[in-house]
Image (tube, rainbow, N blue to C red):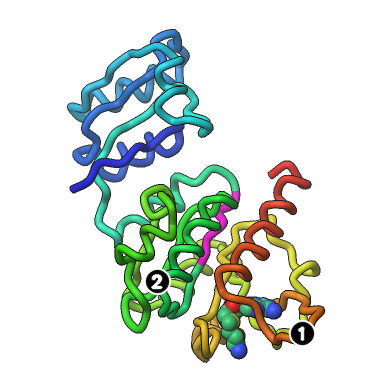
Amino acid sequence: MKNKMIFGFHAVTSRLRHEASSVEEIFVDATRNDRRMQDLVAHAKSAGVRVMPVEAARLDKIVGTHRHQGVIAFAAQLSLARNLDELLDAVEGPPLLLILDGITDPHNLGACLRVADGAGAHAVIVPKDRAVGLNATAAKVASGAAESVPYITVTNLARTMRELKERGVWLIGTSDDADKGLYEADFTGPTALVMGSEGEGMRRLTRETCDLLVSIPMFGSVESLNVSVASGVCLYEARRQRIAKGA
Ligand SMILES: C[S@@+](CC[C@H](N)C(=O)[O-])C[C@H]1O[C@@H](n2cnc3c(N)ncnc32)[C@H](O)[C@@H]1O
């Protein structure tokens, strides 16, 4: 299985708690010896995970612009089913998820992943059936985002949506015929943005499972936007609101 990087205390601790055996190695800032770091190192060592103290500059170089808080783990990808739970546990602040209900064009899927990465969405969730998979074309169009954004395939999308609701995630569906405008909706809490397919939009059950439906105002003569463009507009509105609120 391919290794992935996990950084930050919350995410690394969560992985150690959920499946320590998947963690191959942890790099920690050698100059940090506070209680939080001591606890994490003790937890890792008791689980038999190798801990390597390194210079902070090395951590900076590994993660680029991300915040690592002095800790990076290298771990195997977990099975997809476990990922959503682990992911929600590990997210700091309110989660922002993108649900794609039955996108069939790999270019659109790739572009959605790319904009999800850009806007800092925590995961993209797709149904297993009746949707294009993450194939080579989608991965290429995603320009690296296929590796950086957790991509979660679920067998029953409506059930996953209900589970998200139980975890306090607000499901905001999008449709060009929704009465409420995008800019009237609050995206600052835990949110899953739900997008429909290219031709038909969201399926009936998906639509009915949403807490709220919003439309992006259209000022010209066409009725709707391409799904990846619409994803970008909505995700960046969510991000704008969170920045304004300091979330
Ligand atoms: C090409 S549109 C599908 C249009 C389809 N007629 C429908 O009923 O949604 C693909 C998806 O992009 C999103 N979308 C496109 N334009 C939108 C708009 N103006 N407002 C809200 N969502 C939009 C929706 O998620 C939609 O399901």
Q: Is the magenta stretch mostly helix, strand or loop?
A: strand
Q: Residue at x 22, y 46 (%)?
A: 2
Q: Is residue 57 left or right of residue 232?
A: left
Query: Range of the magenta residues?
Result: 94-98
Q: Does residue 95 lie above or below 135 as drawn?
A: above
Along the viewing direction, whichever of 218 and 81 lies nearer the viewer = 218
> Mark 2 or mark 1, which is nearer to you?
2
* Ligand 1 within 8 Å, label 1 CB: no
- Residue 99 in the magenta stretch? The answer is no
In-front residue for pair 166/231 = 231
Quarter in which the C terminus is drawn: top right
- Compared with 89, 126 (above or below) is below
Please provide percent x and percent y for residue 236. Answer: 67, 57
Q: Where is residue 31 in the image (x, y as percent from the top left)?
A: 44, 8
Residue type, numbered disc 2: Pro
State the residue at coordinates (42%, 33%): 7
SS for callout 1:
loop
Q: Which amino acid does label 1 sit on?
A: Asp
Tell me the residue that label 1 is attached to: 179
Q: What numbered label is drawn on residue 36?
A: none
The picture places residue 74, in percent across and down from the top left corner, at 29, 34
What's the distance in space between the residues labelled 2 and 1, CA to CA? 30 Å
Task: Locate residue 166 relative to residue 139 in the image: left or right.
Answer: right
Q: Do the residues labelled 2 and 1 touch (CB within 8 Å)?
A: no
Report the residue marked by disc 2: 106
Please say if 144 is above or below 112.
above
Q: Which circle's residue, 2 or 1, is located before the other in the chain?
A: 2
